[in-house]
Image (cartoon, helix red, strand yellow):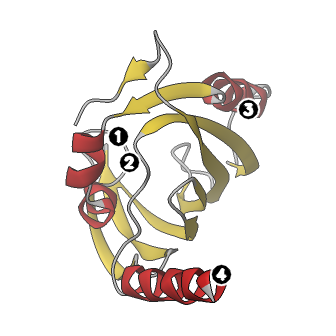
Amino acid sequence: IGALMTVSGCGKSENAAASGPVKREAGNWKTDVKLVKFEVPGLPAGAKDQMTKMMEGASGMDQCFTQEQVDKEDIASELAKGPGNGSECTWTKKDVSGGKIDVAGTCKANNQTVEMAMNGTMEAKKTDVTITTKGKAPTGQGDMEMVMQMTSTHTGPCKAGAAPTKS
């Protein structure tokens, strides 16, 4: 009977969480970034390799999230800010409930407008999001498309020396 109650208890808490965004667990998170697609017409040879190296350089980064940061974390408003500083996004779709992330819209940065979409999953101990960016190539030679996959995994308590995240 005890095991049955435990199972039914789990179901209830999952259903409660399904209505709103999932909260990440406090502790150490390791993020891996993978460049899935990078098509920018007119870019010099080697630019894609440079971008791939930059993504790989961002991979394996450890970040520490305190309980206070996790409690205050609002994924929906973080996504609304868009990538980088100074970019402005207008979202036509913003569904971040029940462990799913399904966001799409338009972002403006550096006098350029791009279509952006983020799809994936968010659990207490893992997030897996694919970010697709489409727009006019900065070179002025057609359309560009970039797809990257970001996977973050909770690896346990904060490590000494892990970069604390800024809230």
Q: Is the C terminus in the top left, top right, bottom left or bottom right quadrant?
A: top left
158 on left or right of 3: left
Give amino acid for label 2: Pro
The image position of residue 58, as x and y in percent, is 60, 27
Choose the circle earlier in sequence order: 1 or 4. Answer: 4
Q: Is residue 144 above or below residue 97?
A: above
Q: Quarter of the image holding residue 79?
A: bottom left
Label 1, label 4: how far apart the Cα atoms are: 47 Å
1 and 3 marks in contact (CB < 8 Å):
no
Label 2, label 3: how far apart the Cα atoms are: 18 Å
Residue 83 numbered mark, or none: 2
Instruction: Return the residue nearer the eye: 108 or 105.
Output: 105
| Residue 111 appears anywhere in the view | no
| Disc 1 element | loop
121 on left or right of 34: left
Instruction: Return the residue nearer the eye: 26 or 78.
Output: 26
